[in-house]
Image (cartoon, helix red, strand yellow):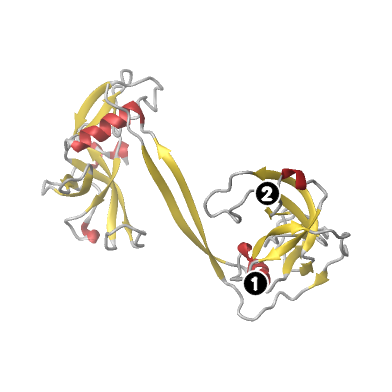
Amino acid sequence: MPDVLSAPLVVEFPFTRSLGPVQSAFLTGLRERTVLGVRADDGTVLVPPVEYDPVTANELGDLVEVAPTGTVTTWAWNPSPRRDQPLDTPFAWVLVRLDGAGTALLHVLDAPGPDAVRTGMRVRIRWAANRTGAITDIACFEPYESEPGPAEPAPHTGEFAGPVTGITAPARLDYVHTPGRAQSAYIKALEERRTVGERCPSCRKVYVPPRGACPTCGVATAEQVEVGPRGTVTTFCIVNIKAKNLDIEVPYVYAHIALDGADLALHGRIAGIPYDQVRMGLRVEPVWSEGARHVDHYRPTGEPDADYDTYKELV
């Protein structure tokens, strides 16, 4: 049995979105050290504010200003902060109902230890020194001995100079991937410029990349089958947005390719042909980079296009 592989992987995507009038006012307000909520149809003040009433689904826009002080409604201690969390020392995750609000805001509390945190404790916002119009403009909450503030929040127009109209929210997941026996064998075969799948003993379909079990029959697979190297484009898309850390000029084509002998299409980039000439049924073959452990891209073989009936089940 081949050695099972493992490798650290990172999935990262900087999500960019535009803001509606309510979210824009909320984030711009944080930049100006002002916390805004929105009044729902039943009179509840929602903080953070939302664009639509969670009960009636009506559009909301009645903005109000709430206090920077509040009460902890529940909490959990975090003894080991991770990268990019708000504080680099142990802290408490807290839900804080700000004075004047009817809902709680999730953030962090800077406290010396879990014994210093309790439900019902009074806290206040510690503002970040440099504020840009993001939830991180609230650096954290800190303990604050005070009585609850006025229950009725003040109306607010939501108007500020230079409003924030969009945000970029980076999403990142670091993990160690262990592909298992079947995929480890698949990866090792790629080092030899071969593509192998596994055949289901029940339905006899060949799956590439192999999964160690048939997704249709639910039975284990072990019989290795070498497929390809040529294949057929079953469907494709044209990529027009350049990916971070990927040295490929746009536009380019990413396709599902059914390798000869396989019953499942895999992903691959198509090159060696203008992007607007790629088509379903195009016959392609792999191109390997020098020293690479995987196929760099697929290029046309020059063969006649495959008949649709030969790959329609794999579209």
Q: Nearer the viewer, residue 108 or 295?
A: 108
Question: Local crowd at mark 2 within 10 Å, few (<14), some, or many (≥20)?
Answer: some
Question: Local crowd at mark 1 within 10 Å, few (<14), some, or many (≥20)?
Answer: many
- The correct choice, above or below, for 131 with respect to 42 in the image is below
- The correct choice, above or below, for 264 with respect to 47 in the image is above
Q: Quadrant of the N terminus?
A: top left
- Amino acid beneath label 1: Arg
Outermost residue, bottom side: 161
Q: Quadrant of residue 34?
A: bottom right
Which residue is tagged 2?
93
- In the image, is 282 to the left or to the right of 53? left
- Amino acid beneath label 2: Trp
Residue found 29% across the figure and 40% down from its top: 266
Q: Quadrant of residue 220?
A: top left
Which residue is tagged 1?
31
Is there any visible trace of residue 117 in the rendered image?
no
Residue found 73% across the figure and 60% down from its top: 47
Q: CA distance from mark 2 to mark 1?
A: 22 Å
Residue 258 coordinates in the image, percent (x, y): 25, 39
- Closer to us: mark 2 or mark 1? 2
- In the image, is 283 to the left or to the right of 157? left
